[in-house]
Image (spheres, rainbow, N blue to C red):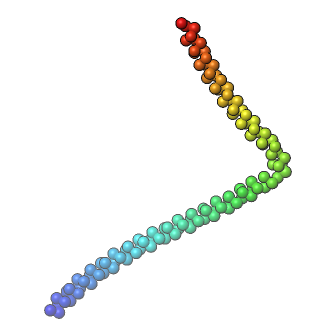
Amino acid sequence: MRERLQKSFDIVMAKQEKEKANNNNKVKAKNKTISKLKNDLDKKTKELNEKNKQNEKLTLKVQNIENSKSWKLTKPLRHLGKIIEIVFLYLSKAIYLSCLFKKDELFMYAIYNDR
């Protein structure tokens, strides 16, 4: 009886050892994944900090340009340039549309005069 109990105990202990080893392997794998994710997070955090610093520098540069005398003096010219651009856009559309209508008129004239 004692031998059977010892054998059963040994079998249970062997199963427990296997399960323990399996669980240890799982824990090691999870720890490895956690370590990799922490490294990735650190890398991304550094990249974000660098981008934020770069953004601050560029924002400061734009503010310096916008506050400069030359920028303030040329504001009317930039405004005039935008107006000219809009006028040019409308004129080019008008010319394009007039060309389309002239083509239609010529086509209708040719059809009408062929009769």
Taking 43 as reference, is 13 above or below it? Answer: below
Taking 53 as reference, is 68 above or below it? Answer: above
Residue drawn at the location 78% of the way across and 55% of the way down: 64
Residue drawn at the location 64% of the way across and 22% of the way down: 99
> How far across and down, in percent of the image, does residue 101 sit?
62, 21
In the displayed image of the protein, which residue is found farthest to the top?
115
Task: Identify the image quadrant of residue 100.
Answer: top right
> How far across and down, in percent of the image, does residue 27 sit?
40, 75
Taking 53 as reference, is 10 above or below it? Answer: below
Residue drawn at the location 64% of the way across and 26% of the way down: 96
Left-right relation of 73 to 38: right
Task: Identify the image quadrant of residue 48.
Answer: bottom right
Residue drawn at the location 72% of the way across and 36% of the way down: 85
Task: Identify the image quadrant of residue 62.
Answer: bottom right
> How far across and down, in percent of the image, does residue 36 sit?
49, 67
Residue placed most toward the observer, 76 or 105: 105
Left-right relation of 30 to 76: left
